[in-house]
Image (tube, rainbow, N blue to C red):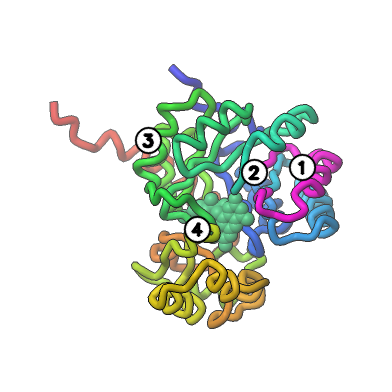
Amino acid sequence: MQDRERITQLFGTKFPLVQAGMIWCSGWELASTVSNAGGLGVIGSGSMYPEVLREHIRKCKKATNEPFGVNIPMLYPAVEEHINTVIEERVPVVFTSAGNPSTWTAKLKAHGTVVVHVVSSVKFALRAEAAGVDAVVAEGFEAGGHNGREETTTLVLVPMVAKALRIPVIAAGGIADGRAMLAAMCLGAEGVQMGSRFVCSAESSGHQAFKQHVVDAGEGGTTLTLKELAPVRLLHNKFFLDLKAAYARGATVEELKALLGRARAKRGMFEGDLEEGELEIGQVSAAIDRIMPAAEIVNEVMSEYRAALQGLTSLPTYT
Ligand SMILES: Cc1cc2nc3c(=O)[nH]c(=O)nc-3n(C[C@H](O)[C@H](O)[C@H](O)COP(=O)(O)O)c2cc1C
């Protein structure tokens, strides 16, 4: 039998619940609040200049004595500077995503950093394990933000990755409450990562208008698009419709790049331009109905998890 508490042991947290690192939405305030509540708070460095990341890490350390992490998407142009910053600042856990796990894992681990890599397929999960990471996040097609091209859902991906790997698996994509957390654990995950739910927290640095738009979103309100560049799940708005029209007229990759332009994500999620901005969010936005303090989200999810676990004994055994 596997030790099912490997994630809490690896991170030194009370709960195997990770608040996803998210550009424009997860700074030190959200990360430290989640860590203080018993989860693992994660700073999303992909939208930060190197000096801004350092400031967030220092503020996070002041606000919590608990472990926290930094997420570094390898698409980030100054990735090496971020890697050096997290090492210098002795950040306990680093999540790498959107790139090759072999590039930085050995360096980070040589400095005692716990390394987790985000994957969306078994193939990349095996590569991450071979690169020496401590755990993987298996992120399904439902998830907000950048994602794999294979469109594998969390329900399908997590058991396949858990079966293929020896290291622990953290499930992500479509998880926003304790029942979904328990379901992911039944599939073989040893922890979960939630993004969209924490976008709608009081401490998230996303613009209030973006948070409210997520709360108002319904079923079918998001689509995984821009597969030719870097696939990303977006909430429908004018910018998304412009993209759709560009696809319909057979736009080239260059045209798509030009349409995306620069700073769209900042404009949408941080500055609250709901028309022209890029609004990254997961399918589970349809189920999120309020903005709550992050500590209350952690407590609610964990009590729902416990209640759902107890409720399992009432399921029929069909013997
Ligand atoms: C607004 C937003 C920004 C995100 N930014 C990043 C990022 O910078 N790096 C990363 O690895 N994942 C990013 N993600 C993905 C999350 O880390 C997480 O895996 C995902 O949100 C989980 O799915 P869920 O939204 O259904 O909970 C982002 C997600 C959202 C919603």
Question: N-terminal of the two: label 1 or label 2?
Answer: 1
Residue 231, numbered circle = 4
Q: Which residues are magenta?
A: 72-94
Q: Which three-letter amino acid code belongs to the residue tagged 4? A: Pro
Label 4 Cα crowd, 10 Å radius (few <14 / some 14-19 / many 20+) = some
What's the CA distance linking mark 4 and mark 3? 25 Å
Q: Quadrant of the N terminus?
A: top left
- List the residue tagged with mark 2: 96
Label 2 Cα crowd, 10 Å radius (few <14 / some 14-19 / many 20+) = many
What's the CA distance linking mark 1 and mark 2? 23 Å
- List the residue tagged with mark 3: 187
Q: Is residue 297 visible?
A: no
Q: Which three-letter amino acid code belongs to the residue tagged 1? A: Asn
Q: Which three-letter amino acid code belongs to the residue tagged 3? A: Leu
Badge nearest the viewer, 4 or 1? 4
Disc 4: residue Cβ within 8 A of ligand 1's nearest atom = no
Instruction: Check if residue 75 falls in the magenta segment.
Output: yes
Q: Residue 295 in the image: x percent, y percent?
A: 60, 54
Question: N-terminal of the two: label 4 or label 2?
Answer: 2
Q: Residue 29 in the image: x percent, y percent?
A: 71, 58
- Dot 1: element: loop
Residue at 56% x, 76% y: name it.
259
Residue at 42% x, 67% y: name it.
222
CB contact under 8 Å: marks 1 and 2? no
